[in-house]
Image (spheres, grey):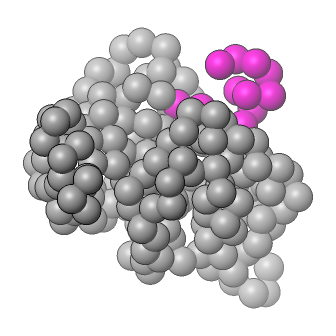
């Protein structure tokens, strides 16, 4: 964490990555929490892992829902990180609302420079919409169309984690596997 503290003090902002889990099987008898990724979801997660590796993303901490589809998404993308992060699986992220996700982020240590959360809609879409400091521009327009499976929103956090609130982050990236397949980015 000492390196994180140095980076944090040198650059007065943090990064937040919201990664929605990849596409999962329809709900069956096993219940929602135990739905596995489907083959297309695995391919989409691999596409995102390659994109993450190309950009050398290195979150210091990954908070992951305990749902099987979120954990499987993490297993696929983790080798793409430039450095191994600390990983915490948390029940509270499973189907969390925007308010619950924001409360979890507010509890992060101030010296933490970058965090990825892997979870679910509708909470992710709502949180991303709340955080973005500006509702204009092409990224905000794309986010306004929804938060598809395996999509990643990247924010610059303009305050300490405890002060993170509506319009206190800048949306600097939003990518989905479909965008990459179409060559949109």
Does residue 31 appear left or right of residue 137 in this picture?
Answer: right
Query: Measured from the top left, where is residue 142 in percent x and y?
Result: 54, 24
Q: How many numbered circles does the render carry? A: 0
Residue 52 shows in the view: yes
Residue at 50% x, 71% y is 65
- Please tell me whether residue 179 belongs to the stretch shown in magenta: yes
On the image, which quarter does residue 68 sit in?
A: bottom right
Q: Residue furthest top?
A: 137
Q: Nearer the viewer, residue 168 or 43?
A: 43
Vertical position of residue 96 compared to residue 49: above or below: below
Which quadrant holds the C terminus? top right
Residue at 19% x, 33% y is 11
Which quadrant holds the N terminus? bottom left
Q: Residue furthest bottom?
A: 30
Residue 106 shows in the view: no
Residue at 56% x, 51% y is 81
Vertical position of residue 46 compared to residue 172: above or below: below
Query: Measured from the top left, where is residue 100 in percent x and y?
Result: 30, 64
- Please tell me whether residue 171 belongs to the stretch shown in magenta: no
Residue at 80% x, 79% y is 28
Does residue 5 appear left or right of residue 58 in this picture?
Answer: left
Q: Nearer the viewer, residue 6 or 118?
A: 6
Query: Measured from the top left, where is residue 30 in percent x and y?
Result: 75, 87
On the image, which quarter does residue 50 sit in?
A: top right
Does residue 110 appear left or right of residue 52 in this picture?
Answer: left
Vertical position of residue 153 compared to residue 111: above or below: above
Query: Measured from the top left, where is residue 19 in percent x and y?
Result: 53, 50
Q: Which residues make up the magenta segment?
A: 174-185
């Amino acid at each position: 964490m000492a390196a994180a503290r140095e980076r944090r003090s040198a650059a007065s902002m943090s990064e937040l990555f919201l990664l929605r889990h990849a596409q999962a099987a329809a709900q069956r008898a096993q219940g929602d929490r135990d739905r596995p990724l489907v083959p297309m979801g695995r391919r989409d997660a691999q596409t995102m892992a390659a994109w993450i590796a190309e950009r050398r993303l290195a979150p210091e901490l990954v908070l992951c829902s305990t749902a099987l589809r979120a954990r499987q998404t993490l297993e696929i993308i983790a080798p793409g990180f430039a450095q191994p992060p600390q990983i915490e699986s948390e029940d509270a992220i499973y189907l969390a609302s925007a308010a619950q996700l924001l409360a979890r982020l507010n509890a992060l240590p101030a010296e933490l420079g970058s965090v990825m959360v892997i979870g679910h809609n509708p909470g992710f879409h709502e949180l991303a919409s709340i955080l973005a400091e500006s509702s204009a521009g092409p990224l905000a327009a794309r986010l306004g169309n929804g938060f598809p499976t395996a999509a990643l929103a990247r924010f610059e956090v303009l305050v300490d984690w405890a002060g993170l609130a509506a319009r206190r982050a800048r949306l600097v990236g939003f990518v989905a596997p479909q965008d990459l397949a179409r060559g949109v980015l």
